[in-house]
Amino acid sequence: MNPTRRCSALVNQLCASSRGPARSGPAPRTLFLPSVLPRPAAGVRTGDPGVGVGGVKGTRPQLKPRGASTTATPPVCPMGSSSSRLFGTLAQPLNSAPLAKQHLFPEVNTDQDLDQDELTEVDPDQLLRECEEILQRRPARPHRDLVYLSHAAPAHLQHNPTIRVMQWNILAQALGEGKDGFIRCPLDALNWQERKYLILEEILTYRPDILCLQEVDHYYDTFQPIMSGLGYHGSFLAKPWSPCLDVEQNNGPDGCALFYRRSRFSLQATAHLRLSAMMLPTNQVAIVQTLTCRATGRQLCVAVTHLKARSGWERLRSAQGTDLLHSLRTITSQTAGGQNQVVSALPLVVCGDFNAEPSEDVYRRFRSSPLGLDSAYKLLSSDGQTEPPYTTWKIRPSGESCSTLDYIWYTQNALSVECLLDLPTEDQIGPDRLPSYHYPSDHLSLLCDISFRDEPHRLM
């Protein structure tokens, strides 16, 4: 079977019945070729699609508020139009018991790569075309450009290629349909049989080397097999008491997922962390992986997390952030053999939905950490010190919320940010905000290209 037929077979197997009957609703999407933004020679990547699929402002459907429940105190929330429970047997242990606190130093290569011969090969270009075909009836995603930073030091392609990192809270399907109350977003726009293709289209457009996701509740039946076929290694960690489990016909608990491209990195170690606050375990988790870059031979530590949501929980988020920073400092510290003296620290990238504005204490703790972290998206501002005005924009029964909650943190003295994906404008997002027919989540994806800075001994 050729790769194209294998790709179609895999998608059809995982995403059956996605081509349902035509329905009234959004205006058909008009497909455009991506705008051409040539990357500097130092940043050229084989198969890199460049920038996002172009979009246009068009007539959007009139969105009707979701009807309120008539039950006074429902024990669970209905999940809308979910067709089946696809969560496989691999997920069952995550449901059965609370998660214990994992050790910071598990065995090396705890997440073993699948045998390459057992993987179903997926042609990313063909899969992207399939996504576009299935999404024909939806408006195109907002057009976004890659912004190259003038001060960024050029990377040497052969010896120090750039590393593309994507951060995204993709919105758990159970929460979107059953609990989050997006009153300006019709349930039809959240239909998983199409929304999953909108998520995959975003990922396939930018093709990150490292992908950090939150609110993943379709890992084993969708993202793990698809991403494995695309050449990624994945790791997933569910919340101990996921709110998704309160929703009827849920697909299992949501959690964090971390993917890296196997052709770019080899895995050295993985730590699954349950975050604590004041010595007490909480419902939030983090995945930390130590990777070796195959091109440079240098190591990189990558973490993904999702801190406690809602206002009123600022102190808890601060405590969770402090616990994560402590764990990261322990994991990234390199000691002189047999001695306890720290001689260096691994470069670090931390991606996450922190559920915290820049004014919160947890943000200040990361900014002033001894790990030397800075937020990549500040570099989009004119002064290089201001976060974007929003990374999430939604309308709930309680009102409209426009906030900056998502971040990509990086080690300033070891890594250089070379370009960032800009954020859509208010007009592009639309009056009904997020999610919508043209964007699958209430959070915007963040993306940047980074490279290793030259080490002093390499300059000699």
Image: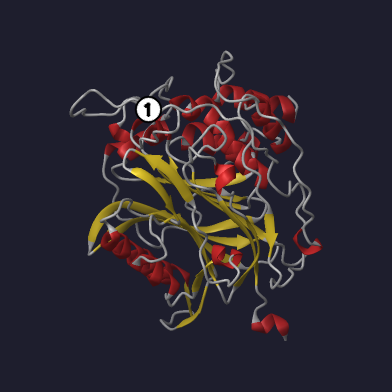
- The image quarter containing residue 396 is top left
Camera-side residue: 109 or 322? 322
At x 51% / y 48%, what residue is drawn?
Answer: 168
Is residue 226 found left or right of 80 in the rendered image? right
Establish if 420 lies above or below 458: above
160 sits left or right of 86 in the view: right
Residue 429, compared with residue 352, is above or below; it is: above
Farthest left residue in view? 73
Is 454 on the left-hand or right-hand side of 22? Answer: right
Mark 1, residue position: 66
Q: Quadrant of the N terminus?
A: top right
Residue 214 in view (yes/no): no
Spot occupied by residue 27 in the image (x, y as percentages of width and height): 62, 25
Q: Position of residue 382 (x, y in %)?
A: 60, 69
Assign the C terminus to one quadrant of the image.
Answer: bottom right
Q: Position of residue 163 (x, y in %)?
A: 65, 59
Q: Say which quarter of the image contains residue 65.
A: top left
Q: Position of residue 429 (x, y in %)?
A: 55, 43
Q: Quadrant of residue 458?
A: bottom right
Image vertical order of residue 456 relative to residue 371, above or below: below
Q: Which structural element holds mark 1? A: loop
Q: Can residue 280 be seen from the camera position used here?
A: yes
Q: Residues within 10 Å of mark 1 (few under 14, many from 20)?
A: some
Q: Residue furthest bottom?
A: 460
Q: Nearer the viewer, residue 291 or 219?
A: 219
Identified by mark 1, the residue type is Arg
